Image (cartoon, rainbow, N blue to C red):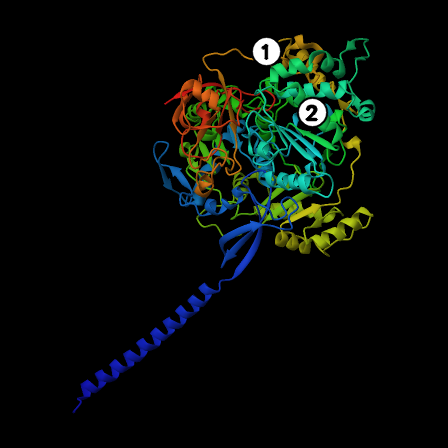
Amino acid sequence: MRVSRRGFIGALGGAAGAAALARRRLATADVASQDLERWATPEESWVPSICQQCPGGCGLLVRTLDGQVAGLRGNPHHPVNRGALCPKAFGALQLLYDAKRLRGPLVRDGQRGRFRPIAWDEALGLVTKRLGELRAKGLAHTVAILGGQYRGSRDTLFKRFAEAYGTPNYIRVRCLHPEEPALAHRLMQGVTTPLGYDLAGARCILSFGVGLLESWLGPVNASLAFARLRGGDGPRGRLIHVDPRRSQTAVKADRWVPIVPGTDGILALGIANALIREGLYDRDFVSEHTFGFDDWTDARGQRHAGFRDVVLGEYGLLAVSRTTGVPVRTILEVARDLATLRPAVVIGERGPAYGRDDVHTRMAIHSLNALLGSIGVRGGLLVQGELPLAALPPAEQDDAAKRGFAQARIDGAGHGRYLLVSSAPQVLPERISSGEPYPVNALVLFATNPLANHPAKEEFARAFERVPFIVSFSPVLDESAARADLILPDSTFLERWQDDHVRHVAGFTCLSLARPASAPLHDTRDTGDVVLQLAKAVGGSVARSLPWESHEKVLHAGVRGLWQAGRGHVISTPAEESLQRVLERQGYWAPQFASYEKFWEALVARGAWWDPTELPVGRKALLTTPSGKFEFYSTLLRQRVEETLAREGNVAPFVTALGGRDRGDRLYLPAVPLREREEPSDFPLRLNTYRLVTRPLGGGGNQPWLLEQPAVHVRAAWERWVEVHPETAARVGVKDGEWAWVESPKGRIRLRAKLTAGTHPDVVNIPLFGGEGPSPNDLIANEADAFRGFGLLNTTRVRIGKA
């Protein structure tokens, strides 16, 4: 066959092209092979982190594959949870990969509720401009920052920004305050730092409505302590749980004591009556370390009633039984258990208020710890040492900041009716709507959604309409963010630097530290970094007060104090920790690391520092009242009342909230007024709200795996329900599984009825967070608790009927 010159060249070119194509295909195949190999054997790492689904502070190990989060488990060396986790922790994966997360900043486009994307620099410029204008006009105090349930360095940054900028209105919207001392502890012991309940060392635990095993400050740590109570080396201990509802804690308890809602303090005083009358209280502790147990005479010669005579004279067991619904025999048996199973500890520090006389109720419950001598002993209440973090330099205030910061807070916290609280968010809607004591010109929302999770959500919605500029840091378009003018989405806790100061576990101090387990999946930022960027942009003394380049640098500066403290250790294996603990108890301590940078690297790699020596703390550190003793008669409370009366007169709102001057000495004693059972009315039932172990704070609507977890006591999941006693349901013609109306003076909601004998006949129970369907907040009146600043969640009267 003859081949022309043109054909030969063409064939040669075709062959060359084929060869080139073959080479490209081989190269592509080689790359694909490498990708397949990398996919089949990804780089795996386990990154220490901290669960932020509740205030428990459990340590995590996050599994990443090629830098992508693929799973998690408990950190076996973390002292809070020792590798154990509750279901909420695993919802963090759905929180991270939630399809509804915002992809980046949004700015209002026309009317509120409509948005368009905006670049970060432009968004921060808008905030800086508004903050600068208000400050230049002398209106820095009209900026309000609303924060939810968080603690540690983010709280420090917001607080510091507010102080340097010049607004007193850094207000926390929450009902749990783990970093603050409980009010009863402050008034009766004078402490300024939180006390820890040593559950692991107790032989008997009496809980008044505290969901130890499902929804308290640390349900995982409490569950580990409960396991020791039941299966430790010593005799089996007892858990006694007082609650109108048979909760998960009640089911696990050795004894469940059903009670009429709102009468917990009266029951505590009945138990005190039995302890005193039968001589079962700790006479040595009471005689040496308490004030106000017996009648006493002051310096002016005035005679005052003592706790003993008030309890014996007014809280007889028959009267207490009639009011609380608890049999006399049960009261006696509980008192005897507490007296014989020592050490014993009594817990009355749940989140929501017990009722309208909440402060005296909590004092009555806490008085049992004094009668049992459980103050400052293992198995009782212990003082939690302060974390030895390096002190940051004081925030600098220029003249504008001083003028603004000196203004009255918009929520009135620290004054008047709310004298004893640090934040009073319940009154915010009314104050913002009325413009009193001044208008709010800018509102910042972080980790809170009051338009969904607050009893005053309708009032908050109307108040938001009065605020010209609202900024939200929400990572999703929740109900409150939807009313904002600008959204600067926060990264999830698996994508940012974070710390946690654990204060609720007795016996040790602990700081957890976590680096990002993953780069941000979207165009989001750590809010800590954003606060620092805003401070720098505002400039002047605000910038000088927050000089750090990043949130990581803030943590690096504070943690240096741990290395310099000369005590404590970065967590390690149990064997190493046991040796360190023995040596430190004997007075020997040697640094683990030669330099601070080595210490920092190890802390980041392992996830926590703690001081596990568990050295006993003298009772002096726990009793810092004017008398230097545990005060049944609170002289601190009396000081506050007398100062308030001198300043405001006999109609002082704070004194009125306490019960009024007519109560005399009982105003300062743990004395809860006895009252007869309420007569049936148009709303004969009491609404009781509660939290499930499978529901994170805020609800978890973007974590469907948690919503799918069944509430086994009523065989329900996904949706909300109302729990009704069978006798109550029969009276209104409602059957198990049927739709029912629950109605209060505020409104009504339609829920599926779940009949259970595990509730008081005069009570209906509705889970507070999570689940599809209407919220109990649609029923709860906007009634503020003067001593916690939050709403009264469990005092609402309701009725139920067939839908």
Q: Residues within 10 Å of mark 2 (few under 14, many from 20)?
A: few
Q: Nearer the viewer, residue 757 or 43?
A: 757
Residue 676 is marked as: 1
The circle on residue 333 is: 2
Residue 797, compared with residue 403, is above or below; it is above
Per the image, label 2 sits on a secondary structure element best described as helix
Quarter where residue 658 is shown? top right
- The amino acid sitting under disc 1 is Glu
Can you see residue 453?
Answer: yes
State left or right for residue 539 relative to residue 254: left
Give the crowd class for mark 1: few <14, some 14-19, many >=20 residues within 10 Å.
Answer: few
Q: Is residue 518 visible?
A: no
Q: Position of residue 638 (x, y in %)?
A: 71, 16
- SS type, badge 1: loop
Q: Is 189 on the left-hand or right-hand side of 654?
A: right
Residue 420 circle label: none
Q: Does 470 appear above or below 62?
A: above
